[in-house]
Amino acid sequence: MGTSPGFFDVDDRLRRLSDLGDQLEAYGRVVDFEAFRRDLERALAYTSGPHGGRPPYDPVMMLKVLVIQTVNNLSDERTEFLINDRLSFMRFLGLGLSDRVPDARTIWLFRERLTRTGAIKVLFERFDAMLCEAGYIAMSGQIVDSSLIAAPKQRNTKEEKDDIKAGRIPQDWQDKPAKLRQKNRDARWTVKFTKAKPQADGTMPPVDIAIPAFGYQNHISIDAKHGLIRKWLATDAAA
């Protein structure tokens, strides 16, 4: 039978992760994430007052969530799960076991808001520059990859789709602000191709299978050895 968890078990496990080489802990040492706060608040343009408007999570912590997501090439849903699951992720974010973790929707909204203002590219370039100044220099070539990030599928009429593609807001949505807030006007459809499995008897050669997907794409350039982010761009899935 296992023993009951002790008071210092979490600290001992975190110490062991440090000894093994926690990459996120290294980022925390060499990058002053607080230096991003003013630019984050300016880009997010959150309001305060009796009606609220400020986010339930600290924007600097949410930027760290994007770093975790990008370094590990994770979807929003997988990011939420792994933050709950991994002590190293929680430590990097300054979260305890009893703290709330941002859900996939919150992560998506935060990234989307930064993308709309064009701030996300500048923020990651500053992050990269801080890593370079600390001696993290790419020496092993680059890996360039993209991954599809699924978004909730929209049920729109043909006229609404035509308006969205033309960059217009459908008139019916303009008259219904609550409905407009629920609509995703930036995600797009694309087709992902994958190889079919060959038949057991080998009589039918494998063919490409077209799988429609709706959402976005994360484009990322990473140092092959150290896993450091060099460039990152978020686009719609059709880009």
Image (cartoon, rainbow, N blue to C red):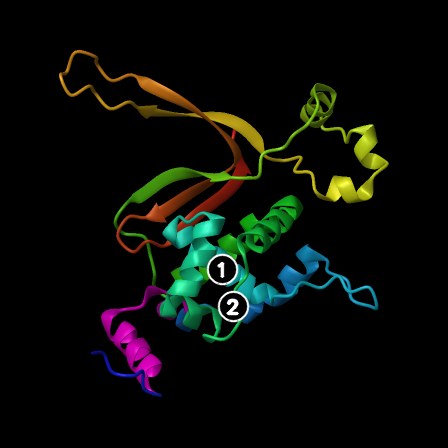
Measured from the top left, where is residue 118 in percent x and y? 62, 46
Measured from the top left, where is residue 218 in percent x and y? 47, 41
Give the mark toward the camera: 2 or 1.
1
Measured from the top left, where is residue 11 in percent x and y? 34, 82
Q: Quadrant of residue 202?
A: top left
- Identify the secondary structure beneath mark 1: helix
Label pair 2/1, CB-CB below 8 angstroms: no
- Number of the label disc, if any, that sits on residue 33: 2
The three-letter amino acid code for the residue at tag 2 is: Phe
Name which of mark 2 and mark 1 comes first in the sequence.
2
On the image, numbered disc 1 is attached to which residue?
Answer: 65
The three-letter amino acid code for the residue at tag 1 is: Val
Residue at 57 percent across and 39 percent down: it is 152
- Against 208, residue 168 (above or below) is below
- Number of the label disc, if any, that sits on residue 85: none
Tell me the magenta residue range: 8-28
